Image: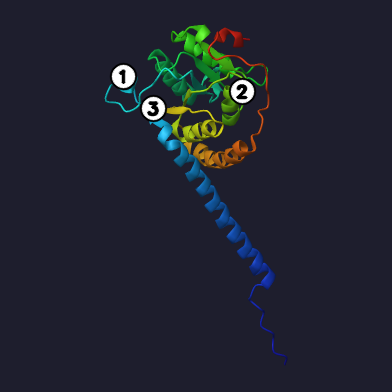
């Protein structure tokens, strides 16, 4: 009788090499993403402030002193629900309006998406501020703030912003301030109050990738989707009305 040959249970060398190559690439990618995230957060952390109420922002004991050098407060868009600000956007608007009313800066710049008919995020943002008592002429709208990067570079190139206060949730604020800093805009960030939002794990994960992307974007000096004529942030905001 012929003896049955034992099957070789060892993987082929080429398959082992391929497997280890994928493992090494994966580890390298994770390390690179981690390093870039730490870089973005570290470079922006000293320029970010948590202010839980209007009163706490302006006491003599508070280390954060707003000055007359701030030319505007940039409120970054966060989407609409049934033609109303989403919970995240509402919190950004409330913080931006409270800073404006406290004298942190003379103008508000609402930057968001108005890239299609029937969806006008910035108009809703402006109307929210008007309903809260902010004069229409002090509210500018950037209709082409399709991303954080585009909001910041258009604030500089279209509206001539030189020293803004940027308002958004803290996890997102690191990237916004980093972009501004990389674009030569000495901006400060003020985080919205610390609320829990549904789907935050997904947003935080996406933000990790977005930080890496915008490190490259800022280094390349990528132009925004739309340019346009310059509009002075020190003028009348009604010029940006539809």
Q: Pointers 1 and 2 in contact (CB under 8 A)?
A: no
Is 56 situated left or right of 223 in this image? Answer: left
96 or 107: nearer the eye?
107
Picture coordinates of residue 56 (x, y %)?
A: 31, 23
Sequence-wise, which precedes: disc 2 or disc 3? 2
Q: Is residue 218 above or below residue 187?
A: below
Please tell me whether mark 2 or mark 3 is closer to you in this view: 2
**Residue at figure coordinates x 44%, y 28% from the top left:** 189
**Residue at figure coordinates x 69%, y 69% from the top left:** 14
Sequence-wise, which precedes: disc 1 or disc 3? 1
Residue density around tag 2, few if under 14, some if 14–19, many if 20 or more, within 10 Å: some
Is 87 situated left or right of 236 in this image? Answer: left
Checking the image for residue 157, the label placed there is 2
Disc 1 marks which residue? Answer: 55
**Residue at figure coordinates x 58%, y 56% from the top left:** 26
Q: Pointers 2 and 3 in contact (CB under 8 A)?
A: no
- Looking at the rendering, in which quadrant would you find the N terminus? bottom right
Picture coordinates of residue 212 (x, y %)?
A: 57, 42
Picture coordinates of residue 35 (x, y %)?
A: 51, 49
Disc 3 marks which residue? Answer: 193
- Distance between the Cα atoms at labels 1 and 3? 14 Å
Q: Is residue 182 above or below residue 141?
A: below
When asked about the image quadrant of residue 242, the answer is top right
């Amino acid at each position: 009788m012929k003896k049955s040959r034992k099957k070789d249970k060892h993987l082929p060398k080429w398959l082992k090499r391929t497997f280890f190559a994928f493992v090494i690439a994966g580890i390298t990618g994770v390390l690179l993403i981690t390093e870039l995230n730490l870089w973005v957060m570290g470079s922006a952390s000293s320029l970010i402030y948590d202010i839980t109420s209007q009163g706490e922002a302006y006491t003599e004991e508070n280390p954060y002193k707003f000055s007359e050098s701030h030319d505007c407060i940039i409120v970054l868009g966060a989407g609409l629900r049934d033609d109303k600000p989403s919970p995240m956007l509402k919190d950004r608007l409330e913080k931006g309006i409270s800073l404006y009313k406290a004298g942190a800066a003379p103008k508000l710049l609402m930057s968001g998406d108005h890239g299609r008919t029937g969806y006008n995020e910035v108009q809703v943002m402006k109307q929210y501020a008007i309903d809260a008592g902010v004069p229409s002429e002090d509210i500018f709208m950037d209709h082409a703030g399709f991303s954080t990067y585009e909001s910041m570079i258009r604030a500089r190139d279209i509206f001539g912003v030189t020293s803004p206060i940027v308002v958004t949730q803290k996890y997102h604020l690191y990237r916004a301030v980093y972009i501004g800093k990389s674009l030569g805009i000495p901006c400060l960030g003020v985080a919205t109050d610390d609320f829990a939002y549904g789907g935050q794990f997904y947003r935080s994960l996406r933000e990790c990738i977005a930080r890496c992307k915008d490190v490259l974007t800022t280094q390349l000096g990528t132009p925004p989707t739309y340019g346009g004529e310059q509009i002075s942030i020190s003028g009348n905001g009604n010029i940006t009305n539809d």
